[in-house]
Image (cartoon, rainbow, N blue to C red):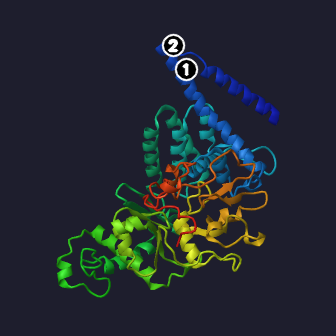
Amino acid sequence: MYVRVMSGGDLQTRIAVLRAAFDEVAACEIELLTRPDLVAALDELEELSCQLPAVGHRLLARLQAEGTPQQMGAKNWSEVLRVRWRISGSEAHRRLTDAALLAPRPSLTGPALPPQLAATAIAQARGLINAEHVAVIRKAVKKLPGWVDVATREQFEVNLVRTAVGHGPKELNDAADRMLFLLDQDGPEPDDAERGRKRGVSIGRQGAEAMSALTGQLTPEARAVWEAIFAKYAAPGMCNPDDEQPCTSGTPSQAQIDGDHRSLAQRQHDALLAVGRIALMSGELGQLNGLPVSVIIRTTLQDLESRAGIGVSGGGTKLPIRDVIRMAGHANHYLAVFDRATGSALDLFRTRRVASPAQRVMLIARDGGCTKPCCTVGAYGCQVHHAEADYAHGGNTNIDELGLACGPDNRSVTDGGWTTRMNDRCEVEWIPPPGLDTGQARVNTYHRPERLLRPEDPEPLGDNDSQASRPADDPGEPGGPAPPEGEAA
C-alpha cells in the first residue's frame, strides 16, 4: 500500500484549507433550502463529524510518541489536554484512551502496528459509527474476561462493529451484554487477579439533600471483615442516633432494642459512621500531611450563631451547621471559624521552613484543596506550597504567602515550568509554561465555587461605607469565605 509522507507544512496547509471550507459553509444562506436539501446537508455533516475524530486520534498518538508531557510543562498527557483545551479531566482521559485504542501503534522496527481496536477504527474513519458507538464497543471489550484468546476478542469486536453500523447505541449495548453473557456462561471461576481488577468503593457527589451514594465491589475478604463489624455495630439497638445515649460498646439494653425501628440498611449506615468515629477518636490513625488524621471543617461565625448555613470539610463535603456543632464535641476534629477572629500565630517568617499545624489547618480551611486550576485533589491530599517564593529562594513561611498544592502540582513549579504568586485577595495564581498557556484562568475555583460569584474588580468603598457594605465574598456566604486579610485564625 502506498502511503504518502506529509510534512508539517503540508498538514498545516490542508488544515487551513479545511478551515476555509468550513467558513464558506458556515456563511451559506440556508433560509431557502428545502427539507430534502436540509436533510442531505445534515447527513453529510454528521458523517464528517464521525470521521474527524479518527484524524485527531492519529495526531494525538503521534504527539505522545514525539515528546513527553514534561517537555510541555505538565505532569502527564491528561493535564496537557485539560489545560490547553480547557476540557475536563474525564474528557481528556477519554480522548487519550480512544487514541491509544484507535490509532496505529508505533513499532520498534518496521511499519506501524494496527490499532488495538482495528475494526472500530476503520468504521470510524469511514464515518459508519459515531462516538457513542465507540464508547459502547470500548467498554464491552474491556469487560471481556482475561481468559478469552486474541482471535475470539477480535471476532467479538468485529461482531459489535457490524451491529453498530445498522443500529443505535442502545441496541448495540443490549447486543454486547448478550454476547458477553453467552461468551462467559461456561467460563472458569473468577480468580484472585480478576477479583482484584474489579474491586473498588466509590462515594458519589452530594445531591440536593447533601446525601451521597455509596457503590462498590468488595472482595470476599473485605465482605467477611464488614460482616463481622456489622454483626456487632449494626445489631438492633446499637449506634442508634435517635437514642439520647447511643450504645456504641457492650450490649444495648432491651429498651434500646425494642425502640429501634431502623431498617437493616439504616443500621449498617449508622454502624459505618460509628466505626469511623471510633477510629478517628482512637488517635491511632497516624498523620496526614503533618496533621493527625482528623476532620477539618470551615464555617463562619454568623452561621454558627444563627445555627443556619453550612460548613465545608477539608475533603469538600458540605455539612449542615447542626452536624458541625455535633461533630465539634468529638475528639480529633478541627473547626476553623472566619470573621475577624484571632488565635494562633500564623506568621513564622524565616524561623522555619515547614508550616505549623495551625497554619495547615487554616490553609485547609481557606483553600479547600489544591489551588492549581482544575485540580480536584481535596485538602486532605495536599501539601503546603510556598506560593510567593520558595523557601530556598528567600520565601517566608507566612500564611499569606502559602497555599495548598497536591504533590505532583507542587513539584511542577520549577524553572521553565509552572510559576505561582499570591494576588491581592490572598488567592494562589498559577501561571502555565508557554506550551500550555492559552490565556486560561489562573485561580482554581473547584473547591471554592462561591468565588465565581465575586466581581473581579469590586467598587472601592469610602470610609463611611465600610460597615454598610460588604464584598461579594462576605464571611456569611454559604460554604465559608476567604479569610479577611491578616485576620484569620
In the image, residue 429 sits, relative to residue 315, either above or below, namely: above
Question: Could you say which disc has been placed on residue 41 in the image?
Answer: 1
In this rendering, is residue 109 above or below 169?
below
Count how many numbered circles sit on residues in the image. Answer: 2
- Which image quarter: residue 111? top right
Q: Residues within 10 Å of mark 1 (few under 14, many from 20)?
A: few
Left or right side of 118 for 240:
left
The quadrant holding residue 394 is: bottom right
Location of mark 2 (residue): 33
| Crowd around label 2: few <14 · some 14–19 · many ≥20 (10 Å) | few
| Identity of the residue furthest to the front in this view | 464
Between disc 2 and disc 1, the foreground one is: 2
Residue 181 lies, in percent from the top left, at 43, 51
User: Does residue 64 appear left or right of residue 429 in this picture?
Assistant: right
Q: Which residue is drawn at 37% across and 61% down?
A: 309
Residue 420: mark? none
Amino acid under label 1?
Answer: Ala
Residue 160: x and y in percent read 52, 41
Task: Give the percent coordinates (x, y) of residue 121.
Answer: 62, 39
Residue 73 in the figure: left or right of residue 272: right
Residues 60 and 363: in front is: 363
**Residue at image coords 49%, 85%:** 284
Type of amino acid under label 2: Leu
Relative to 395, 236 lies left or right: left
Asked whether disc 2 touches disc 1, contact meaning CB atoms under 8 Å apart, the reply is yes
Q: Is residue 193 visible?
A: no
Q: Say what secondary structure mark 2 lies in.
A: loop
Q: Which of marks 2 and 1 is nearer the N terminus?
A: 2
Cα distance, mark 2 to mark 1? 10 Å
Find residue 6 and report its horizontal and vertical position in percent.
Answer: 81, 34
- Quarter of the N terminus within the rendering: top right
Q: Is mark 1 on a helix, strand or loop?
A: helix
